[in-house]
């Protein structure tokens, strides 16, 4: 039997046109209605996953490149995942839901009150995926901040939110019908916060929690991102090369960042995002990988469309057989995102070769990618659990029933037989699920 690990789903592309551009669109689900997401969430709940992290982007991007974001629905439209959460809580029993909240746009008091409300309504299954995106600042009349300052603001934000959550002492709620006293005002603490980024007055107009605070998830692999996770997050949403050595090194960086705050490995979870492609046989895995080595023009265009949205730069109009001039990218585009596309030698590599590299897939059995059988992927999961002390994974994909079944139909039984995927939940809401082993 393997080592039990945590699993979740990363709702990529967010609350937008699920299935757009794929054959699954012909199932005739309506992405603007809750039934599509409720059905998928019920399947994840039954599969024993702990949580769904709901990606979001407030903005359609730069005014001059709106067409890139909506042309293939890579970057928008997107509705607010916070407002989808209650529908998914109604459809599920144990699954935690973690919509994205932008620390630069949502005022701390409002966020604390919304989160407290959903934590109570859901039976303590709520969390927030806290992001520091600065590109959306102009929509609310704010100036964008540099990378480091954005993390300073996020640290102040979550500290104030938690102070609001705990502005009621445990003994403040009396709820005694005999004495007629509902709460003790002497045990509710007003406060004034006047910081660099926020001015907030407490206490919070919401009840204290029965099963702990809402879970805080944060992405970001930069030194500041890792430091934020180490000191203030419950879950680090991680991206890294997924071999045992890299996973072990990544976890150590997060734990090193946590140590000055007095936190230990048991105080947070590091979950790595993966996108498995489960196939019925090793021969089919070989075929899929071989085909990806020679992508069609249509596949190259699809890859280019995705990166065009992320980079707010139309790659589809650039010559495929010439290198990409980095000058085509605006100053607002992340250098890391550009490097993620072009690599270190991108300035001298033809765009066709760059896109071909991105289209290539690898065998999970060779630790070169995520194409493989359910048994092969389970081998990989067990290896990281035993050799790297891995906490678990977030499967990435649309929150669409077709996508969920494609990934999990064969994989869930194999993972359960091997003892690495839970069959039961112990109670205590999302926090209890994440920290019960």
Image: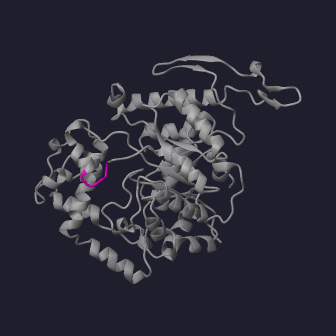
Q: Residue furthest right?
A: 178
Please determine whether, in this image, residue 284 is positioned above or below residue 127.
Answer: below
Colour option used: one colour
What is the x, y in percent for residue 28?
Answer: 39, 65
| Residue 379 seen in render | no
| Residue 409 seen in render | yes
Q: Residue 72: within the magenta?
A: yes
| Residue at 64% in and 43% down | 121
Say which quarter of the image contains residue 259.
top right
Marker count (numbered): 0
| Residue at 63% in and 74% down | 417
Relative to 4, 147 lies left or right? left
| Residue at 61% in and 57% down | 92
Say which quarter of the image contains residue 102.
top left
Please determine whether, in this image, residue 352 is positioned above or below residue 107.
Answer: below
Q: Residue 178: within the magenta?
A: no
**Residue stretch rendered in magenta on the structure:** 71-75
What is the x, y in percent for residue 218?
Answer: 49, 43
| Residue at 21% in and 59% down | 354
Quadrant of the drawing holding the C terminus: bottom right
Between residue 403 and residue 178, name the one nearer to us. Answer: 178
Majority secondary structure of magenta residues: loop
What is the x, y in percent for residue 167?
Answer: 67, 25
Between residue 31 and residue 386, name the one nearer to us. Answer: 31
Please determine whether, in this image, residue 301 is positioned above or below residue 372.
Answer: above
Quadrant of the drawing holding the N terminus: bottom right
């Amino acid at each position: 039997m393997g080592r039990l690990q945590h699993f979740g789903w990363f709702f990529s592309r967010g609350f937008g046109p699920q299935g757009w551009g794929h054959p699954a669109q012909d199932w005739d689900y309506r992405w603007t209605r809750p039934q599509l997401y409720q059905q998928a969430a019920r399947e994840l709940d039954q599969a024993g996953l702990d949580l769904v992290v709901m990606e979001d982007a407030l903005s359609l991007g730069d005014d001059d490149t709106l067409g890139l974001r909506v042309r293939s629905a890579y970057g928008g439209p997107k509705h607010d995942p916070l407002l989808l959460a209650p529908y998914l809580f109604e459809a599920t029993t144990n699954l935690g839901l973690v919509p994205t909240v932008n620390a630069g746009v949502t005022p701390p008091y409002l966020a604390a009150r919304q989160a407290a409300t959903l934590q109570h309504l859901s039976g303590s299954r709520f969390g927030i995926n806290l992001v520091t995106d600065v590109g959306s600042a102009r929509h609310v009349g704010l100036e964008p901040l540099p990378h480091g300052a954005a993390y300073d603001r996020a640290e102040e934000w979550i500290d104030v939110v938690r102070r609001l959550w705990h502005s009621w002492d445990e003994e403040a709620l009396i709820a005694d019908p005999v004495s007629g006293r509902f709460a003790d005002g002497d045990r509710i603490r007003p406060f004034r916060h006047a910081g660099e980024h926020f001015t907030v007055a407490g206490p919070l107009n919401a009840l204290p929690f029965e099963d702990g605070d809402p879970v805080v998830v944060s992405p970001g692999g930069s030194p500041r991102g890792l430091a934020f996770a180490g000191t203030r997050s419950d879950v680090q949403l991680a991206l890294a090369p997924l071999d045992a050595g890299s996973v072990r090194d990544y976890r150590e960086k997060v734990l090193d960042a946590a140590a000055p705050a007095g936190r230990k490995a048991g105080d947070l979870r590091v979950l790595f995002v993966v996108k498995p492609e489960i196939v019925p046989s090793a021969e089919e895995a070989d075929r899929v990988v071989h085909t990806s080595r020679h992508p069609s023009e249509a596949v190259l265009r699809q890859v280019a469309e995705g990166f065009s949205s992320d980079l707010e730069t139309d790659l589809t109009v650039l010559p495929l057989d010439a290198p990409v001039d980095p000058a085509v990218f605006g100053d607002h585009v992340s250098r890391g995102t550009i490097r993620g596309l072009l690599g270190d030698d991108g300035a001298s590599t033809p765009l066709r070769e760059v896109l071909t590299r991105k289209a290539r897939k690898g065998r999970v059995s060779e630790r070169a990618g995520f194409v493989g059988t359910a048994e092969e992927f389970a081998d990989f999961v067990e290896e990281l659990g035993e050799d790297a002390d891995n906490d678990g994974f977030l499967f990435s994909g649309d929150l669409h029933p077709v996508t969920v079944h494609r990934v999990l139909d064969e994989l869930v039984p194999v993972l359960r037989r091997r003892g690495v995927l839970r069959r039961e939940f112990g109670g205590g809401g999302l926090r209890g699920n994440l920290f019960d082993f």
